[in-house]
Image (cartoon, rainbow, N blue to C red):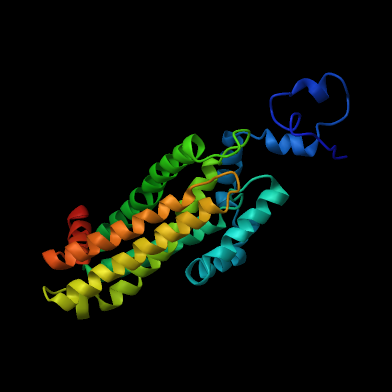
């Protein structure tokens, strides 16, 4: 049986209201709202090895639309909030598929950079746990702190840290496809030289990737109704374009520099 609760009684501040005065079971809404972040994280990680319970088809759908129409993906997050009382994913299928993409792209880098098998494994570990997860933890924590501290309209609710991490994973996928997959096909043919054309293509790939990351991050936080002034995230775009022009004029090929960094990382 599900009991209707007022705003003042639906939060975790009144845990004894139902247990001390009644032998009835705790309302479903109360249980959902009071589920701690640690419990959600434990349930999420526990599913990582249960592939038969993951919805890979839906996760693949999200990946396609993150490239084609990111707004549709975040409409799904809003639906999850209404049905499951949380924005963050409770199914790790997206993370598993993302790891698969990282593995495939690492194979491509191993071919382009002529890495042996052990250096390839080292490169994949760096890419997965440093570039994706560790950087994601830092970015998600910074955005989680800023949004909850400065951008909330309703201080009785907050942005879930897990949702901030999901936004990073969403925003990370299109740059992964652009930089770690598509770019590899033209690296030796076009980008790996000192010409202006090589510099233009190499830096443009990065500009498009950064624009995708910023825009999808903006959509993620804009879809949270308790936040305001999220348009400030888009100020990164003119800054990125200015840096793009400066690098073109200064003769800096970002792709070549990153490739050199990657090669030195595993050498």
- Quadrant of the image for the C terminus? bottom left
Observer-nearest of 42 and 20: 20
Q: Is residue 77 left or right of residue 205?
A: right
Q: Residue at x 73, y 23 (%)?
A: 14
Q: Is residue 198 above or below residue 60?
A: below
Percent across and percent down for residue 214 are 40, 57
Q: Is residue 240 left or right of residue 96?
A: left
Q: Visible in this render: residue 103? A: no
- Quadrant of the image for the N terminus? top right
Observer-nearest of 208 and 122: 208
Q: Residue at x 50, y 46 (%)?
A: 164
Observer-nearest of 266 and 132: 132
Q: Visible in this render: residue 177? A: yes
Q: Quadrant of residue 13?
A: top right
Q: Is residue 14 above or below residue 179?
A: above
Q: Is residue 4 left or right of residue 40?
A: right
Q: Residue at x 53, y 53 (%)?
A: 222
Q: Is residue 28 above or below residue 109?
A: above
Q: Quadrant of residue 43?
A: top right
Q: Is residue 216 left or right of residue 263?
A: right
Residue, far top: 20
Percent across and percent down for residue 136 are 41, 48
Q: How many marks?
A: 0
Q: Residue at x 45, y 62 (%)?
A: 100
Percent across and percent down for residue 21 are 86, 20
Q: Quadrant of residue 199?
A: bottom left
């Amino acid at each position: 049986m599900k009991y209707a609760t007022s705003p003042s009684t639906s939060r975790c501040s009144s845990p004894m209201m139902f247990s001390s005065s009644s032998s009835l079971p705790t309302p479903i809404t109360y249980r959902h709202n009071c589920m701690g972040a640690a419990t959600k994280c434990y349930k999420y990680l526990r599913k990582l090895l249960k592939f038969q319970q993951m919805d890979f088809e839906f996760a693949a759908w999200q990946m396609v639309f993150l490239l084609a129409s990111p707004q549709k993906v975040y409409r799904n997050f809003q639906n999850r909030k209404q049905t499951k009382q949380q924005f963050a994913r409770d199914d790790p299928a997206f993370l598993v598929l993302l790891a698969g993409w990282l593995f495939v792209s690492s194979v491509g880098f191993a071919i382009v950079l002529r890495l042996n098998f052990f250096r390839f494994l080292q490169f994949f570990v760096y890419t997965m746990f440093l570039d994706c997860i560790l950087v994601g933890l830092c970015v998600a924590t910074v955005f989680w702190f800023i949004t909850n501290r400065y951008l909330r309209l309703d201080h009785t609710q907050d942005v879930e840290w897990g949702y901030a991490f999901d936004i990073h994973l969403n925003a990370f996928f299109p740059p992964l496809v652009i930089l770690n997959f598509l770019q590899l096909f033209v690296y030796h043919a076009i980008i790996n030289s000192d010409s202006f054309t090589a510099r233009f293509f190499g830096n443009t790939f990065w500009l498009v990737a950064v624009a995708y990351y910023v825009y999808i991050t903006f959509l993620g936080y804009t879809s949270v109704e308790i936040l305001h002034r999220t348009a400030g995230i888009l100020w990164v775009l003119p800054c990125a374009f200015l840096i793009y022009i400066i690098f073109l004029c200064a003769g800096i090929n970002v792709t070549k520099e990153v490739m050199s960094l990657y090669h030195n990382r595993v050498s």
